[in-house]
Amino acid sequence: MKIPKRIAATVINSLKGGVVPRIGLPYITVGRKTEIDALLHDVEIIADGGASFRFIMGKYGSGKSFLLQTIRNYAMDRGFIVADADLSPERRLQGSKGQGLATYRELISNLSTKTKPEGGALTLVLDRWINAVQAETLQETGLSPEDPALAAATDRKIYAVTASVSELVHGFAFARLLSAYYRAYVDGDEETKAKVVRWFRAEYATKAEAKEALGVNVLITDDNWYEHLKLFAVFFRMAGYTGLYLMIDELVNIYKIPHSITRQYNYEKLLTMYNDTLQGRASYLGILMGATPQALEDRRRGIYSYEALRSRLAEGRFSRPGARDLLAPVIRLEPLTPEEMLVLCEKLAELHAGLYGYERRVTTDDLAAFIRIEYGRIGADRSITPREVIRDFIELLDILYRDPQLQLAALLASDEFSYAKSEAVSDETESGFVEFTL
Amino acid sequence: MSSYNIEKSKFYKAYPEDTRAVLCRVFADFSQHHEDRCKNSLCERLFGKIHTLPYTMFSSAVVSLDRDLPDRDYQIFPWYGYACRNGTWYRTRLDRSPAKNRKLGELVRDVDAILRERYGFDAPLKQTDKTKLFTGIVNSAVDAVQEEKRRKAAAVIHIDVDKLNAIRSDASATREKLMTDEERDDESGAEADRRCLCAEEGGLLTGGNKEYRDALQASETTIFPTCQESVENAECGMRNAECGISSAAATEADGLPLDETETAVLRAILTGGDCGGAAKTGGKMLSVVIDEINEKLFDEFGDTVLYDAGDGPAVYEDYAEELKERIGS
């Protein structure tokens, strides 16, 4: 299989830096077949007008972000708009100081499409929507662009779209603002366009401010931000996209909230989102959340401390490692087996050889020896992550490439090979601390 | 020596190695604690001190023993023996018999009880009063033994090479499912397919994604033209071409798969002209045209070629020369 150099370079350089590459993920995806199949099935459901809600549960470094990024790229390629946000002490699902709204703002500012994968695609989507309506009106009516009747025909078409949105919860104001955006475009009023975008980004602090700027006395708030995301999902579909996919990571930040009542409010919000998607009250919307086992399963502070969620999400009696129900809302990421890690290293060796234009010299036996050493480290069974193994392996490949005379077996046994170390534990000593007197 | 026979314990029968290892560690640690902190050692506490006292050999004998005996020693056990000095016999022994030692038996039983609790064993023993110190020592010993077991298990890694082919083939199947259009085109080296000129993007109606196009045609979305209609329009060209509305056919002269409006806008950006005006002439918004240009040229350049420089769109320097050559500006 010939892998393009551009993709190989991005993958190798990103992995060396310990980050998930933006492209080329299909070339290094090993294992996780059933998990990915389950998520791809979700994508089909959403494209057909449904909704999905999944938790991806795994320890730090188990591959949650990798899986999220893989699905993100796939979804964007399928025409979805993707928005992602990491929760933090300042960004939650609900909060008395606007922490829920902060999450919404983060999601909206990170709206991404295939050609704008870095985010900030809201304005583009609005512009493309209007353009598409105009093109369609032109095509249907056969009028010329200067014909005054064209504007009226376009207005009617815009109204048809906004009318269907206005029937949804909070849709009336949403529809009014879409119309305002369109009118501002027609009139060349960039200022009003900017104001509308500000409203969609929830940047107005008070209703009075919004009323003065746009003539609407409703705001996106900490209580209703999720309802507005549902509206966006429907609107994006009308604008020609497949739907909206939300990816929210670091759910452990809700687990860390010290006040139990505040945690409850957040879990209630989570329950609302979960119920909506699974009971058909949301359309063209997918939600993926990343959480550690503790954040999910801890019965005192985790999601399972909220009984309504626990009873919906907990595994059944028959589920066990190796025989999990992947149609269930929680996808548990098991650590990659040594065999899977070996195949992953094999793919990296191919990528490296293709990138630098040499014949791959590392054999399966060499890879097996490497994996045995990596997994044989003290504590590896509990704490080894793909990130560490990959960084070690790419370092080896670089060394072998620099010196073709070296053999992998000799290198593994030599002092040149050192494990990727956590910076929290270092063997280096400062000379000032070698000896001291109290 | 213990009055509690550990070998008859159910837990010992289930976990003989662990029990043995924990008992040895507990004894060693407890002994060390006594050495460091107590007046008497653990052995002295359990078995008493070793005393050497005069002893009458064969005290019930009716004959008198020769008193002119050489000095000699008879060591039966390390803690039990006889010695003769200057015709007088002495016996060395412990205060308490080491056999069936009750205190040692209690210690062993307590260890057994704690082990059963730690391992969740089905048949727990009735708890007795134990000091915190002792419980701490036993728990530390259990932790150490379990850690040692984990280390030994981790050091032996088995790789089942029979599974590798199945993993490789699953990975290939997953790769095929996940490949994006961009990655597929890169791999095959094919040129980017013609795209519909309706304002869809993100691969929804891109020519390279036939499965998706078919799905959309089957969908009930009616607000906008279906892909099929848009493709037909693209084939025939938009009406009112004299007003500058772009034809669907790519402008072959510049070798770039862009329509007239997109070419005009790109040329304006490259030459510092009025790109906004060029977009307006084509009846489109500038931001939309920029996005369409980026999408159409993404596969050729592997990257977006235009970006927002703050005061208007600009071309990335890396691609400027090539674009100028190809667009003929």
Image (tube, coloured by chain):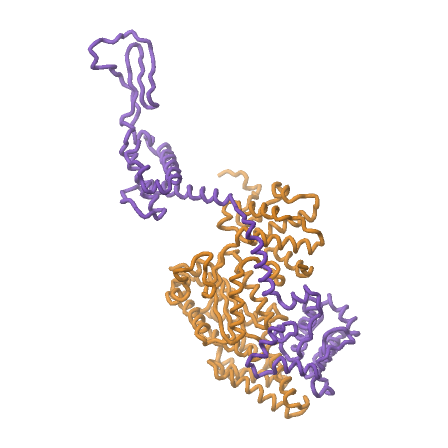
Chain colours: A orange, B purple
Residue A350: x, y in percent?
Answer: 65, 54
Residue B103: x, y in percent?
Answer: 28, 34
Q: Give the total number of marks visible in the rendering.
A: 0
Q: Quadrant of the N terminus of chain B?
A: top left
Say if B146 sits above or below B302 in the image: above
Is any atom of residue A285 visible in this view?
yes
Which of the pair A49/B215 is nearer the observer? B215
Which of the pair A82/A346 is nearer the observer? A346
Q: Residue furthest front?
A: B162
Q: Residue at x 29, y 22 (%)?
A: B93
Which of the pair A183/A132 is nearer the observer? A132
Q: Quadrant of the C terminus of chain B?
A: bottom right
Residue B119: x, y in percent?
Answer: 36, 47
Left or right of residue A166: residue B173:
right
Is any atom of residue A205 visible in this view?
no
Left or right of residue B96: residue A206:
right
